[in-house]
Amino acid sequence: MSIEKVVAWGEKRETDGLITYRIQAKLKGKRELNSLMKEFQGWKHAGEGYDPNNQKTILIMMRIFEDKQSWMKFARTLPFMVEEVNQRTGKKKVINAKRKRA
């Protein structure tokens, strides 16, 4: 089993304009954890929890990006779906969806 998706959100800092992005992933087992850590090298561990209903560990990681474009460039390289939540509206948008060709 592999990681299906991660949820991300960003917060712009007023002091210097940098954006802090956080990702949340639900993982089951050491293999998924190792896979996630490989993709998110250089990110800081921001928190974790546990979902007893489906027996998954919830992991939160964070990293500072210069702007939204650098975040988007990074997110599009990931091998699993990245869903970004708009902080203001709460709407979700898939960042790295593969477009179907007609």
Image (spheres, rainbow, N blue to C red):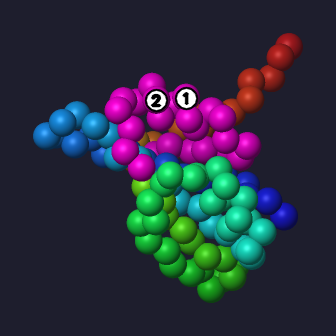
Q: Is residue 34 visible?
A: yes
Give the amino acid at mark 1: Lys
Q: Quadrant of the N terminus?
A: bottom right
Which labelled disc corresponds to residue 46? none
89 or 8: nearer the viewer? 8
Mark 1 and mark 2 in contact (Cβ < 8 Å)? Answer: yes
In the picture of the structure, the residue carrying the numbered disc 2 is 70
The quadrant holding residue 96 is: top right
Residue shown at 18%/36% (left/top)? 16
Residue shown at 62%/33% (left/top)? 76
Q: Quadrant of the C terminus?
A: top right
Apparent side of residue 102 relative to residue 99 in the rendered image (left or right): right
Apparent side of residue 88 relative to residue 2 in the rendered image (left or right): left
The Cα atoms of the two marked residues, 2 and 1, are separated by 5 Å
- x and y percent of residue 10 in the render? 37, 45
- Residue with the most extreme bottom position: 52
